[in-house]
Image: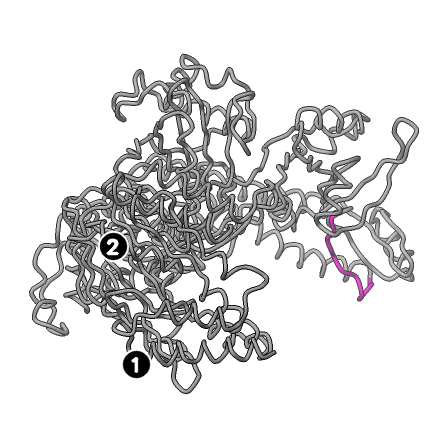
Amino acid sequence: MIAQYLALKAEAADALLFYRMGDFYELFFGDAEIAAGVLGIALTRRGRHAGADIPMCGVPVTAAQAYLARLIQAGHRVAVAEQIEDPAVARRAARPVDRAIVRVASAATLTEEELLAANQSNWLLVIVPDGASTGLAWADVSTGRLVSAWVAAGGDAELRARLAPSEVVAPEGSGVAGATAFAPQHFELRAARERLHAHYGVATLEAFGAFDPPEVRALGGLIAYLAHMARGTVLRLDPPTRDDTTRVMGIDAATRASLGLGRGGLLGRIDRTRSASGARLVGEDLAAPSIDVEAIEARHDAVAWFVERPRLRGRLRALIGETPDFVRALGRLGAGRGAVRDLAMIGRGLTRAGEMAVLLLEGAPDPGAASAVDALHPAPPTVIAARAAALVGHDAIIASVAAALGLGNGGDVPAGTLDTGGFIAPGFDAVLDALREDASGARSRIAALEAQYRAQSGVAALRIRHNGVIGWHIDAPARAEAALRAAGYAHRQTLSGQVRFGSDALADLAQRIAQAAEAALARERAHFAALSAQALESAPTVAASAHALARLDVITALAELAVAERWVRPRIDDSRAFAIEGGRHPVVEAALAAERKPFVANDCDLGDKPVWLITGPNMGGKSTFLRQNALIAILAQAGSFVPARAAHLGVIDRVFSRVGASDDLASGRSTFMVEMVEVAAILRQATPRSLIILDEVGRGTSTYDGLAIAWAVLEWVHDRLGARCLFATHYHELTRLAERLDGLRLATLRAREWKGELVFLHEVAAGAADRSYGLAVARLAGVPAPVIARAKAVLARLEAGRPMVSLEGELPLFAAADPSAATAGSTGEDSIAARLRAIDPDQLSPRDAHEILRSLAAMADAHRA
C-alpha cells in the first residue's frame, strides 16, 4: 500500500495527497505533518518505511469538504486519490485496492458551493509573457466564464489588482511573481490553438472573435491547466470573450486600497443585490468602471427607468431574491460534481427567469401601481429589454426537471440523493415505480416470513433483521438456538445472548430486495445523467440567462440605492468637466448616519482650474473630501447614480490615489519609499484625462526635502500632466504657487477654535488655512498638557526664525534663515523681536492678532523658564 501511495504522491508532486482508505482520506509522511498542523488534528504513526515510523493523519470522507477548504485557504493544493475498484475484488486478489488521482483541488478550481464565497467571482488567471506584450486569460470555473486580453509587457499588475484572482498560473521559467509554474509546452501557440479547437469542437476561433497570438497562448494554457487539475474531466467553459483593457478605467492596486473599493468599503456600501450572481457582477462593475460614454449612459438610462417605477422594481426584486445561483449549479454539473439539488436549482432558476421576462416584456397595466409611470409600463430601455429577452427559451429543460423531480412550478428540492435514491417523482417512470414496489413489497413479504418462522419455531422473540456485515438474517435469544436448529434453519453466528440463522427462502427474498433496490437506484441515476446532459446541452443559453439576470439584479439594486439614499444621475460626456454640487462620501455618510450625525456636503469644480491645493487641519476632512470625489467618479462610470445634488463629469481614463501612510516591511521598504514609488507611478502614467488625488506628499522625510518634493510634484502635475488633481498638504508655503500657476485653485477645510477647543466645520472654502492646528489636534488626541505647553514654546521659537519661501528664480528653493535666530546664543528677546518684525499689521484679522499675542506670551514664558 505504501508503494502505491508513494507512486501517487510522485504524481501529485507539490500537492498534498488525500489517499482514500474506506471511510477516511489518509495523509502520510510530510503531507501528514503539514495537514495535522493546519487542521489541528492528531498526528499518529502507522508502520515503518526506510527504518523510520510513518507519520499519518486522516479526515472522514463525510467531512472532507470542510478540511479541504481549510487546507486550500492555507495556500495548499490537494490531490484526491479515490478507490476506483470494488474492495472485495482486491481482497480476493490479495492486493491493495486500485486507486487513482481523480482531481487536484486548488483555490481557483473549486466548484463546491460550500467552498466558495457566493458574492465573489473565483478567478484563475493565466499570464503569458510574449515579447513586447503579455497574453492574459482568466476563468471562473464555477460559472464557466472565460475572458482574454493582452497588454504591453509587464502591464498585467493592474489587471491582477482588478480581478484579485484566487490563483495565478504562468509558464515555468517566465518569471511571473507569485504564479504557479506550468510546463511551457502547454503555452506554445500551435498546441494552444489546437487545444482550443478541440475543446470547443471548432475549426477556427473566428466565430468567437479575433484573438491575438498572446491571448491564444494564454487561453490554450488555461484549458490545459484545468484539464491537468481535473484529471480528464472536461470542465464546461463558455466560449472566450475579449476584454478590451483600454475601455475600462485604470485603477492600480495602491489606489484600490487607498480608496477602499472592496466589500469592507464602497462595494459593501452600495451592494443591494438580491442574488449571488448579481453580487458578483456589481463587484466586477465597480472594479472596472467603463470609459465608454455610450455604455455608461445606457446603464444610467436603465437605472433611471427603474427609479421611476417603484412597484415594478419591487416585484422584480422579489423574484430575483427567490432565484437560486443556478449558473454555479450548472458549473458543478459540468465539472462532474453535480447533485440532485443542482438540477432542482436550474429548474427553479429558469422558472423564475421566465416569470421576470413576462413581467418586463409583457407586463399589463397595473391597477395597483404606486404611480402613473408604473401603470403605463412602456417598453424598457435597450439594456433591460435585451436582458429580458435572454431570460426565456428554456421550457423543455424546465418541464423535464419539474416532471422528473416533482418540483411543480419551482417547489421544494426532493429529499433523495444520488447515494440513497428516492429523488425521482412517482409516476415519472413506470419501470422505476415497479422496481420500488418490488423492493417495498419484498419488505412486506419479509414481515410475513418473520411471522411464519415465529409460528414454525415457536420462538415468539424471533425477528428478521439486516446489518451491513451478514445482510438479512433470523435473530433470536441464545436460549432459542435449539428450537431454531430443530426447525431446520442454518446457523450463521452466535453472539453474547443472541444467535443468528439463515434460510433459503430468506436468502432468495433478500436477493430480490437487493436487486430491486440496486436496479431502482441505477435507474434513478440514469435519469439524473440524462437530465444533466440535457442541461449541459443548453448550457450556453442557460448561462446567458444567468448573466442577464445578474445584470437586471445590479440595475434594480442601483435604482433601489438611488431612491433610498437620494443619489442623482450624473451627466457624463467626453469633456474635461468635473463639477460636483453637494458631493458626499458614501461610506462616511453611512457611518455618520448610523450615529445620527449629519454629513457636510461640499462642492468641487475642477473646470477652469483643474488643480486644487487644499490646506486645513488634521481631522478637518481633507482626506474624506479627496476620496469622495474619486469615489463619485468611479461610481458614475460604473453605471451608478452618485451621492450629490448634481454632477457633471468628463470621462476619466485613470484614477490615482496617494492618501495615507504605510510601509512594506516584507520588502524592506519604508513608509517614505512606498510613498515615492506610488508618486512615481502617478507621474509616469497619468494623462490629461486622469484624476489624481494626493494627500501630504513629502511628509515622510525631512521638512525641507518633503516641501521640495511636494513643490516639484505639484508643478509637474500642473505644467506637464494637465490632469485633474486634488492636492492636500500641510506645507502652507505651497500656497504661494497660486501666484503663478494659472490652473491652481486654493481651497481649505474650515475649522475654528472656540473657548480653547478646536471645532471642525468640514466645509470646503476658497483660500488657504491660516495655520495647521496641529497642537489643537494633539490636545484632542489626549497628549499630556505639559507636552502641549512645551510644544507651543518650541513652535513659537521655530516660527520666529522660520525661513521664507523665495519665488524669485525659485533656486534656491528656500531662502536662508536668519543665522541669529538659530544660534545657541540667541536670547528670548531676540526671538520675540524677530517674530514682531515678521508681522504685517495691515494683513491681520482680529483672530490672527489674538493668536500672535498668545504665541508671543508662550515665547516669553519659555524664556523666563
Q: Could you classify mark 1 by the number of other residues whose Cα lies within 10 Å: few (under 14), some (14-19), or many (20 or more)?
A: few
The residue stretch that appears in magenta: 458-468
Q: Total marks drawn?
A: 2
Residue found farthest to the top: 190
Q: Mark 2: which amino acid? A: Ala
Relative image position of residue 615 (x, y in whole percent): 34, 62
User: In the image, is 172 to the left or to the right of 734?
Assistant: right
Above-or-below relation of 860 to 31: below
Give the percent coordinates (x, y) of residue 758: 41, 79
**Residue at mark 2 to residue at mark 1: CA–CA distance:** 25 Å
Residue 220, located in which quarter of the rendered image? top left
Q: Which residue is mark 2?
A: 738
Residue 716: image quadrant is top left
80 or 773, which is in the foreground? 773
* Label number found at residue 846: 1
Answer with mark 2 or mark 1, whichever residue precedes in sequence. Answer: 2
